[in-house]
Image: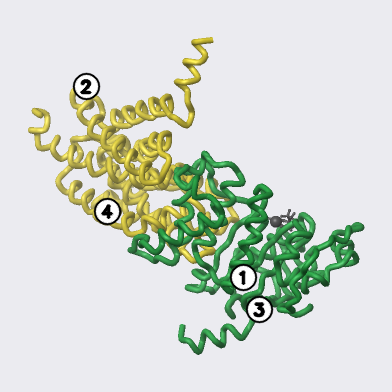
Chain colours: A green, B yellow
Amino acid sequence: MSNKDKKEDKAKNIIELENVVVYLNDRMVLEDINMSIPYGCVTAVIGPNGAGKTTLLRSILGIIKPSSGKISVFGKSPDHLGKDRNRIAYVPQIRSVDMTFPIRAKEAVMMGRYPRIGLFAKPSKEDYKIVDEVMEQVDITSIADKPLSKLSGGQVQRVFIARALAANPELLFLDEPTNGVDQLHSSNFYELLKVLKKENMTIIIVSHDVGVIANYVDAVACINKKLFLHSVPKAINGKVLSEMYGCDAVLFNHGEIPHMVVCKDK
Amino acid sequence: MGIFEYAFMQRALIASIIIGVLCSVIGVYVVLRGMSFIGAGIAHASFGGVALGYLLNVNPLISAIVFSVLTALCIGKIARRKVIKEDTVVGIFFSATMAFGVLCIGLLKGYNIDLMSYLFGSILAVSNEDIYLIGGVACVVLPCIFVFFKELKFVTFDPEVAEIMGLPVNWLYYCLLVLISLTIVASMKLVGIVLASALLITPAASAYQFAEDFKTMMTISVILGLVSCIGGLVLSYYLNTASGATIVMLSTTIFFISVLFSPKKNYIKRLIAMIKK
Ligand SMILES: Nc1ncnc2c1ncn2[C@@H]1O[C@H](COP(=O)(O)OP(=O)(O)OP(=O)(O)O)[C@@H](O)[C@H]1O
Ligand SMILES: [Mg+2]
């Protein structure tokens, strides 16, 4: 891609959804979603269980096809991303992988490098260095040599976060990444989000830590089948939350909120 | 090594070594991806290919390769659509290709094919031509595995994330199906159609009991595959038993011993603890 192309690319939004409707087994799971996420924006997706958050991510990733509407990622349709897929990384919510697979933690993290290394080549010194760095970032250096089958749920989760980071992606999707991760390492992870943001990574993170996450993101998308709000975190109030969750929601106290208006209101 | 003075034993030995390596390498992917049933299905499809070869008067191994590769790709294509479950698709093709083979043989009235040797293998059946074919298959399969080693590993471990991050998952899946088909047809003369899928699964399944990383599993699998094939061949010579069956029985014995001593299962430790009580 030439430099000029890249600039034009940057000017537009990295992700755009226009009137997206998704049906799963004849049930409407997402209804008329419109949103656009600019480059470098960290967006939290919140909503109750079964709201369609995972479905939204998977639609953007091109695993689920919307029945109508238009999705574009890097200005392309998600099922025609081609080489641009190498710029994406993903930490899924439900791990469908076999936990008894014979593989060590550092091997699993290295997999994040594979799409970048390309065919025929072996991991270089640089790749090993990056793997060491990201393992340090999520504090799994001490368990690097352990096989996956001997790790705890939260440790495995951190291995998968490290794998996604190892890809050094421009666009990172995290579906409840701190699920099962202890307090210390969760807050460690949220601090890491700030570092990644400085590196200009565009991040979409699904989370149930509504109160905490608001302090670390530029925008919040509240989803329950429909998009209730897509705005800066401080725009969230009790009314929106109770509308979305369908019950009286407690207004949380999110202290110092970043005031950057990066994402436009819906 | 008196027994390898005979030319037929030399051919059988070369075949055993190549097949031992091929099956145990491909087997690692088959076991880890849970493709055992597809393996068995493809093996049975090759029977249809052999019969068709006789009917059309072409080399049965060549027709078996073409037929089983096409069947494997069909199964893969339909299973990928996810409308019908993979094991259902395999089950249908499994019996259909067998039935097709039986019909073909019915058309060859009066022609006496040595069917038993295709179904259950025979060391006497391995000809020079077969050795070239088996060698040729190895020259395709092993370099493929070598070149796509890390990609196949990622795809076997976590196909969804591999696809999202840009690996050609579909393409690698079809590639694996073709490699499985080639390996099965190559093993056909030595161990037979019915037993080929066992050789594909058992050494890798034994290795799985011990391995904590991927390369170790591959290495142990290859060692056990070679021990089973060469050991089984020698045993079959002295015991005067069918080579395929002996190889498979030896490899199954190794499997049960592996399970018994598996550090993952700790049966021995538990047994000792029970006795102490
Ligand atoms: N394969 C499927 N077929 C039919 N319905 C599905 C399927 N997968 C999910 N659903 C439904 O779609 C809705 C949205 O599911 P989704 O997984 O996107 O929710 P979520 O917001 O991620 O929930 P959670 O907070 O529990 O992760 C749910 O009501 C669920 O029952
Ligand atoms: Mg979810």
User: Percent from the top left, x then y, of residue A125?
Assistant: 36, 61
Q: Mark 3 lies on which chain?
A: A
Would you call the spot at circle 3 few (<14 residues within 10 Å), some (14-19), or many (20 or more)? some
Q: Residue tagged by mark 4?
A: B62
Q: Mark 1 lies on which chain?
A: A
User: Percent from the top left, x then y, of residue B117?
Assistant: 26, 36
Residue B99 visible to the viewer: no
Q: Which chain carries label 4?
A: B
Ligand 1 within 8 Å of the CB at mark 4: no
Kind of residue at disc 1:
Lys
Q: Distance between the Cα atoms at labels 2 and 3?
A: 74 Å
Kind of residue at disc 4:
Ile
Q: In this view, does B275 lie to the left or right of A214?
A: left
Q: In this view, does B98 lie to the left or right of A190?
A: left
Q: Mark 2 lies on which chain?
A: B
Q: Residue tagged by mark 2?
A: B239
Residue positioned 28% across, 46% down in the render: B186
Q: Distance between the Cα atoms at labels 4 and 3?
A: 56 Å
Of badges 2 and 3, the one in the foreground is 3
Q: Distance between the Cα atoms at labels 1 and 2?
A: 70 Å
Q: In which quarter of the image is ligand 1?
A: bottom right
| Secondary structure of residue under mark 2 | helix
Q: Foreground: B19 or B52? A: B19
User: Percent from the top left, x then y, of residue B82?
Assistant: 58, 56
Residue A180 visible to the viewer: yes
Q: Foreground: A191 or B90? A: A191
- Up/down of B265 relative to A76, above or below: above
Quadrant, the C terminus of chain B: top right
